[in-house]
Amino acid sequence: MKYWYRSLWREETVYHGSKFSSAWPAPEYPLNMLVLSMLKQKPEWFREGVRIASFFGEFPTLLWNGGRPSNYDQCDAAFIQYAVKSINAEGVPVRYTYTNMLLTKEDLNDPYCNFCMQAADNGLNEVMIFSPVLEKYIRDKYPGYKINSSTCKEIRDINQVNEELKKDYYLVVLDYNFNNRFEELEKIEDKARCEILVNAVCVPDCPRRSAHYQNVARNQRILLENRELPPEQRKPLEPWSCEYGEYNCIYTIQNYSTYVSSEDIWDKYVPMGFHHFKIEGRTANIFSLVETYTHYLIRPEKQGEVRIMLLNNLVSSKVITVNPPQNRPFAVGTEGMAASAGGEPAGSTEDSQRGEGYGTRDILASAGFLLFQDAEPGHHEYDEGLSRQIPGGISYRVCVWHISGSHLERRTGFFWSDL
């Protein structure tokens, strides 16, 4: 029995039969190629029947893209052609995520979007669609592509799902709110052409989902317009913040009604006739993706070994850079251990920036702690188990950061700060 995953090239993965799909081409591209190579060389490490069905995503920054934001520069022609060729050479399709819901007829002539379509127009690859305008254009101009109906359509009625399946779509990606609602899922007439999003980081029944997709679509256009403008004339992006999607991971979503476990894929969904499963993560950090891939794809007894092997390979290929600890002398002064009136370790920020003396944060950082000061009221849901008491009565919360010299930049957490 085969099950397929779809994977990200910029970010995600899927099962069929069990087939899985995944994302690219930022850090996810080398990670996905590593997983694909491992599947060929060590198939016994993987759960029975796993196959990689596609890598999905976009070459940033691309006007037709939707669902997740692009904050990167654009790719050159040689890289686009190389990435498509290298993925296809392994027998894996590229699936473009062209789900921008605010496209106009004028947008269809975008040269960068059309070049990406031409680069993968070989009969193997796929495109995920939301806009009827774009769908008609692609069907007419690029008939070799398999067309998939996007979950961004938010189809929440089973009768409408069955109507969607009567159309000429290769796959229909179901709304994640159908997950684990087995009485409704049983009513789907063509389960073999449905795809299940197994690890949605969105809270179930999110009321802001459509607004978020529209925000991504508008910002995509702003990013591209800003490329043609001098810095002083560039427009600010429309802000968006979500306390769930930005901080959730495979371990924080397991109490959601929409979470699909690895066991349920094989024990419930596959016997029902579902064979395509999608792992999202286009904007997730590389460590979260490694955890998610091992969780779904790898046999439990091999997960630790595979996790370390993937991380070591990502270090060797320079996708992850490991810097040695800074050689700082141990120094404790009463000034560094005391709290100022505002709750900040007195002198630590300014002294560190000047290179004069060592405050509380300097000492902790040199000892391997990556810390930031407690969040403002309103983030109490993150407090439990994540704070430490530092001498002087100052409470910090542990998080994941990127350190460059004396600068500390937030990767996951609430704040950034200078050390």
Image: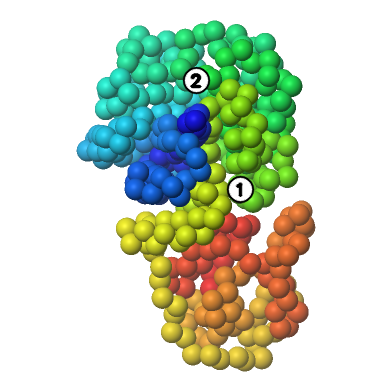
- Is 30 left or right of 268, judged from the image as shown? left
- Quarter where residue 116 is shown: top left
The type of colouring in the image is rainbow
- Quarter where residue 173 is shown: top right
User: Can residue 162 be seen here?
Assistant: yes
Q: Residues within 10 Å of mark 2 (few under 14, many from 20)?
A: many
Query: Viewer-proximal residue, 358 or 306?
Result: 306
Dot placed on the residue nearer the N-terminal end, 2 or 1: 2
What residue does disc 2 label? 171
- Quarter where residue 57 is shown: top left
Query: Viewer-proximal residue, 344 or 119?
Result: 119
Residue 31 location in percent, x, y? 40, 49
Residue at position x 43%, y 84% in the image: 327
Q: Amino acid at mark 1?
A: Ile
Q: Residues within 10 Å of mark 1 (few under 14, many from 20)?
A: some
- Is 241 left or right of 16, judged from the image as shown? right
Q: Is residue 419 above or below residue 244?
A: below
What residue does disc 1 label? 250
Q: Amino acid at mark 2?
A: Leu
Q: Is residue 57 above or below residue 43?
A: above
Q: Is residue 78 above or below residue 124?
A: below
- Is 35 left or right of 317, judged from the image as shown? right
The answer for how far apart the CA atoms under marks 2 and 1 are is 25 Å
Instruction: Say which element carries label 1.
Output: loop
Residue at position x 73%, y 76% in the image: 389
Residue 341 location in percent, x, y? 74, 76
Q: Is residue 18 above or below residue 201?
A: above
